[in-house]
Amino acid sequence: MRGLRTLLSQAWRWLMVVGVCSLANTPSMATEFAAVTPDHPLVFAHDTGAHPAFRTEWWYATGWLNQPDGKPLGFQITFFRSATGHDPADTGAFAPSQLIIAHAALSDPSLGRLVHDQKIARQGFGLAYAKTDNTEVKLDAWQLVRAADGHYTVTVNAADFTLNLSLTPTQEPLLQGDKGYSRKGPLAAQASYYYSEPQLRVSGKVTRVSHSSDKAGLDTTVTGSAWLDHEWSSTVLSADAAGWDWLGANLSDGSALMAFKVRGRNGGTVWSHAALRETNGRVTVFDAGQVDFTPLRTWRSPRTGTSYPVSETLRTGALTWRLDPLMDDQELDSSQSTGAVYWEGAVAVSRGGKTLGHGYLELTGYAKALKLEK
């Protein structure tokens, strides 16, 4: 579900620009998007690649980075693929059948707030694409590529920073939901195919771009850990959904924790789920009443006036985790291009006053309720 509203909002605006049907008119389109079903097994490495028959898809990497001086950074890079439903009979090079969208962000406490950038283009001409059979997504000079040995190369040249990172798996993929079939609502159709790659070992370089003519960019060698989500679907959330809280966390003992709650417009829970994979590989799944996010402290954005529960407790069964932000101001405001305003940032995970790991928390629908209907 991560990034779904951003993707659809941005795709809407791009489709209006190129003059084809909008996503809101999907039922009238000639294209029938593929359906998510519970009986379809995921196959690796084939399913690390793109699935163009499905309406939406994203590869989403987040992580904590350690600088030589011991100070942490957070990073996020997302590539979206969106099938527009454009007439499949139009096979011309300029046909806007697939859109590629990318977002990148850096959480640097020394700057005091999130810095981010974004790109969008129709697929084609070798400039923007999402290849099948193996992860290889590109948008201009931004790339996410999976090598034959499974490690990922991240290349981002954003307006205020660059990322040149290597993400190396240390564990097998974690299939979310029921063997990769991940429900997002009470209807069986409200689901996606979803797997995660937690505990990725990170190495590489971050460069903060200087806009002063007499200063070069500051290169920093970094190490750390990352979490990669890959998700694809042809449906969206029901009209009852207002937004969601989502967490992906790498724990220090090698465990991995994913949890989300889809919040209803009436303040209740539309759907919730969590999974904890321990160091021995055992996965415990938590559903319905076993999962909840409870605000501890809110932060109000000085720019948008939105209040976010940046510090929360997460309950998964008998376990309660505390989530505290690397810094409060990790709001991503892309209202001028996508209509989306949300909070997504690096958080520390603790219990009983002891830090147990680090992850990323996403908070959507707090600025205004989402408008996503099937």
Image (cartoon, rainbow, N blue to C red):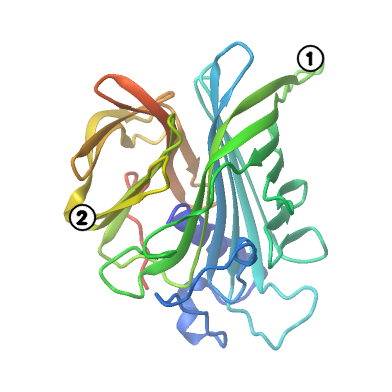
State the residue at coordinates (74%, 54%).
148
State the residue at coordinates (59%, 71%).
83
Question: Could you say which disc has been placed on residue 374 in the image?
Answer: none
Residue 58 at what x, y percent from top left? Answer: 55, 57
Q: Secondary structure at mark 1?
A: loop
Residue 332 at what x, y percent from top left? Answer: 48, 39
Choose top left, top right, bottom left or bottom right for residue 181.
bottom left
Residue designated by label 2: 269
Q: Is residue 311 among what the camera can see? A: yes
Three-letter code, disc 2: Thr
Residue nearest the viewer, comparing 10 with 345: 345
Cβ–Cβ under 8 Å for marks 2 and 1: no
Q: CA distance from mark 2 to mark 1?
A: 50 Å
Q: Is residue 267 among what the camera can see? A: no
State the residue at coordinates (57%, 88%).
30
Residue designated by label 1: 215
* Left or right side of 42 for 146: right
Count of labels in the image: 2
* Classed neighbour count for the residue bearing mark 1: other residues with Cα under 10 Å, few (<14), some (14–19), many (≥20): few
Residue 310 at what x, y percent from top left? Answer: 33, 31
